[in-house]
Amino acid sequence: MSISGATDPVETATKPDGIVQARGISKTYDGGIQALEGIDLGFPKGELTTLLGPSGCGKTTLLKIIAGLLEPSAGTIIVNGRAVTGPGPERAFVFQDFALMPWASVLRNVAFGLELRGMSRHERHAIARSYIAKVGLAGFEERYPHELSGGMRQRVGLARALAVDAEVLLMDEPFSAVDEQTRRKFQEDLLHLIQSENKTFIFVTHSIEEAVYVSDQVVLLTPRPGAVSRVIRTGLDHGGSPEELRRNKRYLDMVEEIWQMLREYLV
Amino acid sequence: MRVFGRDIPIMFALVFWALAWEIVGRAELVFLVPPFTHVLAALAEMVQTGKFRHATLLTFESFALGMGLALSLGIPLGVLMGRVEAAEKLLGTWVNVFVSAPLTALVPVIMILFGLGQTTIVVTVMLFAVWIIVLDTQAGIKHVNPSLLEMARSFGASRLDLYARILLLAALPEILAGVRLGIIRAVKGVVIGQLLVSIIGYGELFELYSRNFLMEQFWALTILLFAFAMLAAELVGWAERKVEFYAGARG
């Protein structure tokens, strides 16, 4: 299927290059369920790439393999030219269910990655405070997760991932557990963050609008076993105002195009 | 509680039944029940005797040693069973059998193994308390949100970090519940052990008082023990409520 001239996104070959590369990644779970098959992908530095596909296509599995939390059955993940054997300090993960420690304050949660690295309390708290402010939670440092709304909790999760100053941020459906309004605001803030942080983001979502709205590159995966169906460059200017972007014809057309591509997978 | 539209304080129940006890005692209806005030007087007198102090010390020591053993065996065993499936399969059934078994029946066997001394009491206390601690710890560990473990691993946590900074803290509400129930069982264990051995601690006193029909002293000692069991369980219950807020917050 080709994309009409109206949107004209540049389709790149799925040849791996970039700061993170997936080479021939396959994953078969115990019990014989094959989640991923022969994934070759490159994630360009400083860009946001979205993994998009129907539920059960192995998007999260791929993200966790990149994170080093799961081992692939075949293939290698290369980050900065080195093969991944487990989690590493150059990658940080943002969890779908936030994964905050309920017994720890916001400050301690955000500083947790630094705490594990053995940084002194004074130093790590100073860093944590600055990122708490950056995600808009200044004043909530001493609160506990159960006192915060879902959106605020995910901001804590984001601040924790930013605080360790990893080059690659892996985000597993970070907005799926928050309500629609919060979600929109969150997406806008995320775009702002990408502009200012100059990090590489890999983002998993099942929302087409969200994928197109935040991404430089969208990877479409086929249903189980997940394989790369298409890689689409959005070519959208994420620097402009959110209102402009949401009304942008190219944005709207691309959402429609991707929907047309994905619907063939739905029974 | 409200009676005729008035608030009645909780303490009222205690006062009411103490009064009933006093009346029954004064009326000399049942020989086993002396007036409550006499029991209190006996209590005040009893706590000043050397014999009582010695017995109390011994009882506390057995209780603390047995409970300490139960904690230092029960929590690691529960963690092991919560983490390693093979351990759960191997031990799970036995823990469940022991947690509901009438362990009193085993005390004579313990007596044969460890003699008529304090060791038997300590082992009895441990045996009474340990199983529920194992079971609750295991339940707590099994219910730790797996994404918390993934989170810690993704930020570079070592194996030790996972246990010390995530697993034990996340399972703390269940572990404390196990400890509270364990304490209640340990009090039973110390009394039953001492009664069956009957030559040491409160067991000796109970034996002495009941054999000589010293009902006032007998009841005084009983009240003291009940109060201690309640107080100890309440203390742990208080700690439990302190950490309860995050038990519900786990996804």
Image (cartoon, grey):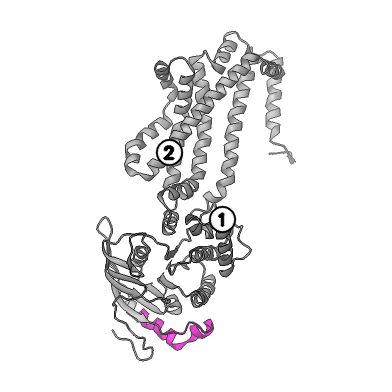
Residue A139 placed where, x, y %?
Answer: 64, 63
The amino acid pointed to by label 1 is Arg
- Category of crowding for the residue at label 1, using alpha-carbon neighbours closer than 10 angstroms: few (below 14), some (14–19), many (at least 20): few
Both labels 1 and 2 in a single chain: no
Q: Which mark is residue A192?
A: none
Would you say residue A211 is visible in this rendering? yes
Q: Amino acid at mark 2?
A: Pro
Residue A44: quarter of image: bottom left
User: Looking at the rendering, in which quadrant would you find the N terminus of chain A?
Assistant: bottom left
Vertical arrangement, residue A72 with respect to residue B181, above or below: below
Q: Nearer the viewer, residue A165 or B97?
A: A165
Residue topped by disc 1:
A121
Q: Which residues are magenta?
A: A235-259
- As helix, strand or loop, the secondary structure at mark 2 comes to helix
Q: Quadrant of residue B153?
A: bottom left
| Residue at 43 percent of width and 48 percent of height | B160
Q: Depth check: A90 or A138 in front?
A: A90
**Is-magenta flag for residue A238?**
yes
> In the rendered image, is residue A106 in sight?
no
Determine if the magenta segment contains residue A264: no
Give the left or right position of residue B92, taking residue A181 as reference. Answer: left
Distance (Cα) linking label 1 and label 2: 30 Å
Assign the C terminus of chain A to one quadrant of the image. Answer: bottom left
Near mark 2 (Cα within 10 A), the count class, few <14, some 14-19 or many ≥20, is some
Q: Which mark is residue B76?
A: 2
Side of A40 relative to B182 (left or right)? left
